[in-house]
Image (cartoon, rainbow, N blue to C red):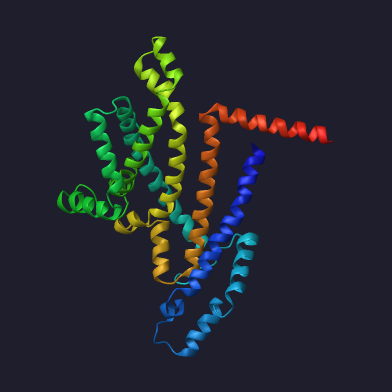
């Protein structure tokens, strides 16, 4: 297992390098000059040239890319922001916990709603309950997040004044952003839960458990749900990783000072070090999340752990025979 973890961590290196390479290329072909944003478009040419030299923008893109990689690897230095002249890593560490908390709460809300919804739909399949649940799930999948966020703000903030329209200073400030992201994921999780449970409840061990006189809820939850969790966990990992970067819509609408809004502001200002640093952080976070999801498979399904151990034993025997 340790060897597998190390292998996955090493795979993060080409992923991050690929992300940075794409960002550097896009920064070169994107219209606009960060110097114009910093000193003004009407500044004298000598002032612009001095600023470009200070920021190192006169160097070829491959030189800047190499220097950036060296600083990240040797010093964990993501550079300084063009606009604030503060370390990007420091600014990201202030904002990342906010984005992570927003994402985790939204996933939790989505799972609390979607798993019972999917279970009920699978148990009562083809009934009016199933049709209603899947209609709600389809609504959640189809609804645009930005529209849903604006509607919730209009209804619950402007009209009813139940929650603040922006900021997350108190508990009430988290409700609308979390609901916006969470409700959008309910439909996806509910449909996966339903399809996975429909496959599981037709297995022989479910019929055996019922034949032994087990209560129906024990059969469904203890015997069925655990074996149906693998595709759900896989989807949760994907959604969690995507939501870390995709929370930019909720953060922008509700003025949440997270990583997504930070990167969006940096893109508008052509603040490339902040964009690059944010993408490095998100790429590392996504890779770690997917690694944790893979490790959860073994905890949920002991068959996977046994299969992994069997492969290691076979490899050890082969090495012993070759020696």
Is residue 206 something that shows in the picture? yes
Q: Quadrant of residue 225?
A: top left
Residue in the picture at 76% in, 31% down: 317
**Up/down of 149 relative to 133, above or below:** below
Is residue 81 something that shows in the picture? no
Q: Is residue 60 left or right of residue 319?
A: left
**Up/down of 238 relative to 89, above or below:** above
Give how far across and how far down residue 185 sits, in percent: 34, 44
Q: Which residue occupies the foreground of this view, 251 or 214?
A: 214
For the N terminus, give its image quadrant: top right
Give how far across and how far down residue 282 sits, in percent: 49, 54
Q: Is residue 27 left or right of residue 152?
A: right
Residue in the picture at 71% in, 31% down: 314
Give how far across and how far down residue 256 sits, in percent: 34, 56
Residue furthest toward the right? 323
Give how far across and how far down residue 166 sits, in percent: 28, 56
């Amino acid at each position: 297992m340790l060897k597998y973890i190390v292998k996955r961590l090493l795979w993060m290196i080409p992923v991050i390098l690929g992300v940075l390479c794409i960002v550097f290329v896009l920064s070169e072909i994107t219209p606009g000059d960060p110097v114009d944003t910093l000193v003004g478009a009407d500044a004298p040419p000598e002032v612009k040239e001095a600023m470009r030299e200070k920021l190192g923008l006169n160097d070829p893109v491959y030189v800047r890319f190499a220097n950036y990689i060296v600083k990240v690897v040797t010093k964990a230095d993501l550079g300084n922001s063009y606009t604030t002249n503060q370390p990007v890593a420091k600014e990201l560490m202030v904002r990342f916990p906010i984005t992570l908390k927003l994402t985790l709460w939204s996933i939790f809300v989505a799972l609390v709603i979607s798993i019972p919804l999917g279970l009920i739909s699978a148990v009562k399949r083809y009934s009016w309950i199933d049709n209603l649940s899947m209609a709600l799930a389809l609504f959640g999948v189809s609804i645009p997040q930005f529209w849903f966020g604006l509607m919730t703000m209009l209804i619950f903030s402007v009209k009813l004044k139940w929650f603040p329209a922006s900021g997350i200073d108190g508990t009430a400030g988290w409700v609308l952003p979390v609901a916006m992201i969470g409700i959008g994921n309910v439909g996806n999780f509910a449909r996966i839960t339903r399809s996975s449970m429909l496959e599981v409840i037709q297995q022989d061990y479910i019929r055996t458990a019922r034949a032994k006189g087990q209560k129906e809820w024990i059969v469904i939850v203890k015997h069925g749900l655990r074996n149906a969790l693998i595709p759900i966990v896989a989807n949760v990992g994907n959604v969690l990783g995507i939501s870390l970067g995709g929370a930019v819509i909720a953060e922008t609408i509700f003025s949440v000072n997270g990583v997504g809004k930070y990167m969006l502001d940096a893109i508008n200002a052509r603040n490339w070090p902040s964009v690059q640093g944010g993408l490095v952080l998100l790429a590392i976070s996504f890779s770690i999340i997917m690694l944790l999801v893979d490790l959860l498979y073994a905890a949920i399904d002991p068959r996977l752990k046994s299969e992994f151990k069997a492969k290691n034993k076979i490899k050890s025997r082969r090495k012993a025979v070759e020696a």
